[in-house]
């Protein structure tokens, strides 16, 4: 599997350069996505602009990876799906649970909004002293 990595302040962008993602790439893709969770920043934007075809097992792996990121208070957004990828995703039940956007810019916005949301939720845990 071929890809390019770009590190940003709040997230890592991985741009896959393979045009076809077949089921034999699931183990390598799993290792790649899991490696992002082990370092900072642990948010991921996955750019699929070069991909023209993907297997159901890849879609399922990405849905599972997204869930793992959210379970670990991190964001995972997939962007730049071709119309053929979007059509194949729409044909599954995964379309409702996968976080996808049309552009990388929109993906960045989602990551930043989710970061702010997590910060606000963390601040809700503070105890306030009240006077009787």
Image: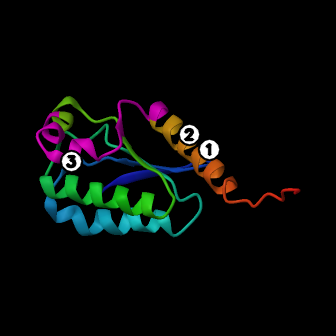
Q: Mark 3: which secondary structure?
A: helix
Q: Which residue is mark 1?
A: 116
Residue named by callout 3: 94
- Relative depth, front residue between 6 and 57: 57
Q: CA distance from mark 2 to mark 1?
A: 5 Å
User: Residue visible at 11% across and 39% down?
Assistant: 91
**Residue 87 versus residue 130 in the image, above or below:** above
| Image quadrant where residue 57 sits | bottom left
Q: Which of the image's four quarters has the N terminus?
A: bottom left
Q: Position of residue 67 (x, y in %)?
A: 36, 58
Residue at the right extreme of this rendering: 131
Q: Is residue 53 left or right of residue 49?
A: left
- Dot 1 or dot 3: first in sequence order is 3
Q: Quadrant of residue 125?
A: bottom right
What whole-number distance in Å separates the C-alpha atoms at marks 3 and 2?
23 Å
Instruction: Say the numbered circle drawn on residue 113.
Output: 2
Q: Residue furthest front?
A: 132
Query: Can I make out residue 19 in this image?
Result: no
Residue 129 visible: yes
Assess disc 2: are there few (<14), some (14-19) or many (≥20) residues with their C-alpha within 10 Å of its C-alpha. Answer: few
Q: Position of residue 76 (x, y in %)?
A: 42, 51
Q: Which mark is residue 67?
A: none
Asked if the magenta segment contains residue 102, the reply would be yes
- Looking at the rendered structure, the secondary structure element under dot 1 is helix
Residue beneath the point at 79% across and 57% down: 128
Q: CA distance from mark 1 to mark 3?
A: 26 Å
> Residue 50: percent from the left, percent from the top?
28, 39
The stretch in magenta equals 87-106
Left or right of 85 in this view: 11: right
The answer to whether residue 120 is magenta is no
């Amino acid at each position: 599997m071929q890809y390019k990595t770009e590190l940003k302040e709040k997230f890592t962008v991985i741009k896959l350069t393979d045009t076809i993602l077949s089921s034999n790439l699931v183990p390598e893709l799993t290792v790649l996505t899991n490696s992002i969770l082990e370092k900072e920043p642990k948010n991921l934007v996955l750019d699929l602009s070069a991909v023209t075809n993907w297997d159901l097992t890849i879609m399922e792996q990405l849905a599972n990876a997204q869930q793992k990121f959210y379970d670990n208070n991190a964001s995972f957004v997939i962007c730049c799906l071709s119309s053929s990828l979007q059509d194949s995703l729409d044909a599954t039940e995964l379309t409702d649970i996968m976080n996808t956007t049309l552009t990388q810019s929109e993906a960045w916005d989602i990551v930043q909004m989710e970061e702010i949301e997590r910060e606000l939720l963390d601040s809700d845990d503070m105890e306030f002293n009240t006077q009787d």
